Amino acid sequence: MAKPILYGADYSVYVRIARMALEEKGVGYEPVPLDIFAADGIPAWYLEHHPFGRIPAFEHDGFRLFETSAIARYVDEAFDGPALQPEDARGRARMSQIIGMLDAYGYRAMVWDVAVERLEKEQPDEKLIASGLSQAETVLKVLTSLKSKGPWLLGEQLTLADLHAAPIIAYFVKVAEGRDLLARFADIRDWYVRMAARPSFAGTEKTA
């Protein structure tokens, strides 16, 4: 059986989520670098893999997927290795709720409105950063309220919720405001320290 193929760039939070899922399952895969912000634009061939020109995209034995959550769930269900989804309906619902919340309310605020704005703009929009930090605070409050007792977000089992949250927060804490805000939420701060120690996290960190 051919190795799965993952298209994307190592700067992408969502590519990292998919990579972490593959790493946690112990699945060998072929990374295909693809920079959607390249000067030449998105290559025409890639639109056959992702018609909206986003990353990541995924292929396994001719089966193509885009959307990170779909890719991560497929990786968990199609390959051997530790289960990354709860067996019970309520656990799976909570996992999906956390992932959905992060996509809808966390990613834009934490990554783009705070970290990218502060790190990559010559004249950062301070109002946008302040708004992003306010939204991020709500996200961290809710994440704290949803976290189960135990080392991971859903308790004793590492799940796709952990793998989804960690790369988003990793980008957020690249800036001082993100680190300072996370420090106010001890449960999530300590959870993040545990996630950062996992080989799947360290092995997918962008080095340049």
Image (spheres, helix red, strand yellow):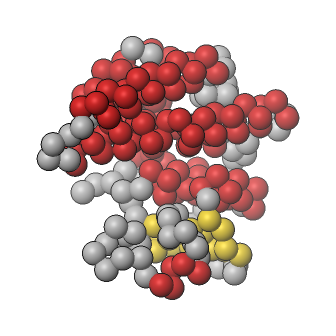
- The image position of residue 149, as x and y in percent, is 65, 17
Judged left or right of residue 4, residue 42 is: left
- The image position of residue 179, as x and y in percent, is 31, 26
- The image position of residue 118, as x and y in percent, is 23, 39
**Foreground pick, 172 / 132:** 132
**Residue ID at (53%, 35%):** 105
**Residue ID at (67%, 24%):** 155
Judged left or right of residue 175, residue 82 is: right
Instruction: Please identify the quarter of the rendering in which residue 180 is found.
Output: top left
In the rendered view of the protein, which quadrant contains the N terminus? bottom right
Task: Please say if 132 is above or below 57.
Answer: above
**Foreground pick, 124 / 85:** 124
- The image position of residue 73, as x and y in percent, is 70, 53
**Residue ID at (82%, 38%):** 87
Q: Is residue 151 visible?
A: no
**Foreground pick, 192 / 26:** 192
**Residue ID at (28%, 26%):** 177
In the rendered view of the protein, which quadrant contains the C terminus? bottom left
Give the residue at the far right of this rendering.
89
